[in-house]
Amino acid sequence: MPEAIAENSIGIVKPQLHHFDEALQLDCGKTLEQYDLIIETYGSLNADASNAILICHALSGDHHAAGYHSMDDKKPGWWESAIGPGKTIDTNKFFVVSSNNLGGCKGSTGPTTKIPGTDTFYGPDFPIVTVKDWVRSQQRLMQKLGIPKWTAVIGGSLGGMQVLQWSIDYPELIDHAIVIAAAAKLTAQNIAFNEVARQAIMTDPEFHEGHYLANNTKPKGGVMLARMLGHITYLSDDAMREKFGRELREGKLNFGFDVDFQVESYLRHQGKSFVERFDANTYLLMTKALDYFDPASDYDDNLVTALQQAKAKFLVISFTSDWRFAPERSRELSRALVAANQDISYVEITAHHGHDAFLIPIPEYLAAFGAYMNTVAAKTENAENKKASS
Amino acid sequence: MPEAIAENSIGIVKPQLHHFDEALQLDCGKTLEQYDLIIETYGSLNADASNAILICHALSGDHHAAGYHSMDDKKPGWWESAIGPGKTIDTNKFFVVSSNNLGGCKGSTGPTTKIPGTDTFYGPDFPIVTVKDWVRSQQRLMQKLGIPKWTAVIGGSLGGMQVLQWSIDYPELIDHAIVIAAAAKLTAQNIAFNEVARQAIMTDPEFHEGHYLANNTKPKGGVMLARMLGHITYLSDDAMREKFGRELREGKLNFGFDVDFQVESYLRHQGKSFVERFDANTYLLMTKALDYFDPASDYDDNLVTALQQAKAKFLVISFTSDWRFAPERSRELSRALVAANQDISYVEITAHHGHDAFLIPIPEYLAAFGAYMNTVAAKTENAENKKASS
């Protein structure tokens, strides 16, 4: 339980479930005849519906980006540091929408929900979804919410990839694209890490070819390994050194295979707690969406041509010690945006936190991000004033 | 079968098994009452026994460093590129000794050998061994072979750690210490990767708490995962990009969890083939030896004091794209050697191959390494000439 909810928190929030009846054609060739999206919103939509922001989540994220579900919650949403009244993404100014992606495991239709009209979990039969599919489903959501245009779409990591896809697929529907700690496509090394994580899950004997729920079990070991591995790649070598060094948990070597070093204890704990809150099939789907993301592939593998479709202004942010999506990937993207004649600001933040930095309230980061958001807000306000006075 | 063995190969070699009856006290507090070491030697010991070189192997290496065991062998020893007549480690000049470490799985006493006087495999009951223990066992081997002093001890990665320990523990017994792609201790990130590999093996249901041989099985899945993960860290991001990029194995996305990208296929193959040739308990032991290595810990955590014990000349080599044991780790070691007033040459090789570079015949690497070995050989020859003329 939060002792007291901080004044600059959005406070208690309530998720909403939206049902969609119109069939959604997916990139894999399959069709979802109907589906649900669970979302949260923070702040209020202004009179001319010009202040809406979409937040896109990363691999293990969800719709719960800010605030608390109840006074019993130990932790707020995953981006509490950035979203709230007076914060970088200021809920006094913006109407913020955050949805759990299709294929997720926190309420949107996915492997842990039941096939409509049956008592059977989708499980491994939930189709492979892509970043493009998500963006398509988010555009439907936007229509349903009566939002004509996003003043900004914002996301980090896999969320940043959705932002990029938004700017290319729906250029008329997005004013600002804020792409944080992302890349225009994965490297072979990224794919390799994802593949090891997938193999860990799929070779777990409790996986049952994905039908573990029907077998009343879970591939806990595999998910734990995947998460442990993930955590190594989210932290920088330096951050790990600073956080753990070679510190021994019991002050001495044990000459056995139990925990010797603090870093081992940390990873085991992270792995075990993740097992309780995340679904294995969703993890598999999310990693494939990452691997498959490559917006240039629709434009003869030419990223510049792909980005020429966009009409948004871009803010691209990277972090010096991020080796999962290294600054060089953001620089590549920025160069392609410049070549595509786009309005682009690129900020490289000096931070030792690794990929995780995008979730951390680093002053230099929030200053740059916040300054940009102020210009976004100013435009929104001007638009409203103009309308009011016209 | 090699179509024809290259002229500059040492050719067909035969391992020798050496039995040791004198008890070996280990760092973990346990004692090996007796043990075997399997070794190979290449070249001839000269009259005054002044031309002997010890090769120390890395995590998955063994005593078979050069040549072939039979005409049916598909591959030569693991360092064929560096060891042989006329090669960098010239077997026309040097007597090269290469032994499988204690705890290994290729013939030296370890988890896959039987407890003396019983029909039971050591399995998980083989004690945790350290780099110091190995060096102690290699010093016994040296005595048995009638070698008064190594003209050089050479190793890469975990092998380089043994070289460092040799220089500190037996300063009188080693003239040159050649430490390649190593570090004076692991970082938290290194330990973290090892821990994920260990968890992959130990959580495999076929592990049976290490007694898999007694259960007629093997933790194949876990060992495969450990090796896949290892391979990612042995290659650089750039090397992976060059080798695989985002190339699709079948030219298209499959929208499933079978192999899409070439890099996935490569990793699965590497993992599967490793399972056939390596023992899980040995893998666990080797990773612990890596984690525990920290020669400074015997000297109040002062690496400079530790290195002040040494009397050898040092050659330290690192590779620019090695992120498992980054050049910065070799630079740290080199700075400590300078501070310890040692005779040290440091070479940083520009190479995109990652940690694997130490096994690859990169011209700049072999040129620097070879030039150093020529000075080692010259001293050996001078010593012999002096003796002959006296």
Image: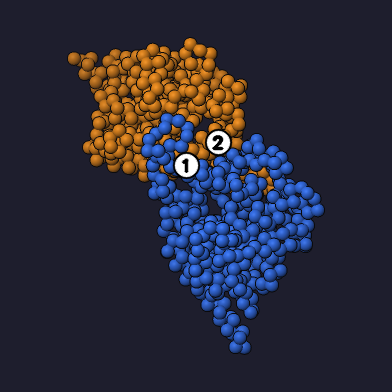
Chain colours: A orange, B blue
Q: Position of residue B112 (x, y in %)?
A: 69, 50
Q: Position of residue A82 (x, y in %)?
A: 42, 29
Q: Quadrant of the C terminus of chain A?
A: top left
Which residue lies under the disc numbered 1? B265
Q: Quadrant of the N terminus of chain A?
A: top right
Query: Which chain is disc 2 placed on?
Result: A
Name, please, the residue furthest toward the top. Answer: A117
Name, please, the residue furthest toward the right. Answer: B117
**Left or right: A270 with respect to B205?**
left
A247, above or below A39, in the image:
below
Residue drawn at 51 percent across, 60 percent down: B2
Q: Are marks 2 and 1 on the same chain?
A: no
Q: Position of residue B334 (x, y in %)?
A: 51, 62
**Left or right: B122 with respect to A270?**
right
Disc 2/disc 1 C-alpha distance (Å): 15 Å
Q: Can you tell which of label 2 and label 1 is closer to the viewer?
A: 1
Name, please, the residue furthest toward the bottom. Answer: B390
A318, above or below A281, in the image:
below
Which residue lies under the disc numbered 2? A200
B30, above or below A176, in the image:
below
Q: Position of residue A45 (x, y in %)?
A: 34, 16
